[in-house]
Amino acid sequence: TEEKSLKSAQNIINNNPNFKDLITCRLQDNLENILFGVLKKDEYFDLSICNPPFHKSHKEASAGTIRKNKNLGKKNEKLLNFGGEANELWYPGGEIAFITKMIKQSAVRAKNCLWFSSLVSKKESLNVIYKVLKQFKAVEVKTIEMKQGQKLTRIVAWTFLNKDAQEKWAKKKRISPA
């Protein structure tokens, strides 16, 4: 994540007093990692939220914009239909590769976070993501669909903690388990 994106997120949190002391944003300095380096071995979080890069390349991102503009009946507009820095918009292998790496790293930090989650833009990515979650022994997986206009996305959330461990976590935090 770029520093200016982190500052923007922190500004949103700071302007919402109910969340100010509950949400922590961190900058990932190492582009080879997703969770390692920001989620330490001795830290515990209730939730990790990720909005991953979903394109495989700048070329794929541009092609998506052209296709969208054509479907909307717009002239060829060269601008991408979303903002952000390069490493926030595309990743080698796209969202499947990014989320797969996140799942692998979350399995290593399985007891440090109650729920991990990621936005999934492409429906065709879901089956691969579910297989990877099964391979890394996620105990529970939930998918939440969201629709805004013509765009359908989903959030996939997973935990490595069984119901007993979730209940113990909730008692420590005094929250109700999912």
Image (cartoon, helix red, strand yellow):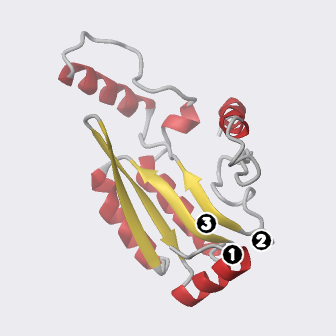
**1 vs 2, front mark:** 1
Q: Is residue 93 visible?
A: no
The structure residue drawn at horizontal position 27% and vertical position 54%, both measured from the top left corner, is 124
**In the rendered image, which quarter is residue 66 located in?**
top left
Q: Which mark sits nearer the N-terminus, 1 or 3?
A: 3
Please give the name of the residue rendered at 47% of the width and 64% of the height, measured from the top-left corner.
157
CA separation in Å, label 1 and label 3: 27 Å
Q: Position of residue 137 (x, y in %)?
A: 48, 81
| Three-letter code, disc 1 | Arg
Q: Which mark is residue 105?
A: 3
Q: Residue furthest top?
A: 75
**Gap in Å between the C-alphas at discs 1 and 2?**
22 Å
Per the image, label 3 sits on a secondary structure element best described as: helix
Above or below — where is 56 with respect to 73?
below
Whether tag 1 and tag 2 are in contact, CB under 8 A, the answer is no
Q: Which residue is mark 1?
A: 174
SS under mark 2: loop
Left or right: residue 136 versus residue 167 is: left
Answer above or below: position of 14 versus 164: above
Rendering coords of residue 154 (x, y %): 37, 53
The residue pinned by badge 2 equals 41
> Residue placed at 45% from the left, 27% from the top?
82
For image coordinates 58% across by 29% down, the residue present is 85
Q: State the separation of the CA atoms marked 3 and 2.
A: 12 Å
Front residue (pair 27, 140) = 140
Q: Position of residue 9 (x, y in %)?
A: 65, 37
Q: Earlier in the sequence, mark 1 or mark 2?
A: 2
Q: Residues within 10 Å of mark 2 (few under 14, many from 20)?
A: few
- Mark 2 residue type: Lys
Q: Is residue 35 left or right of residue 73?
A: right
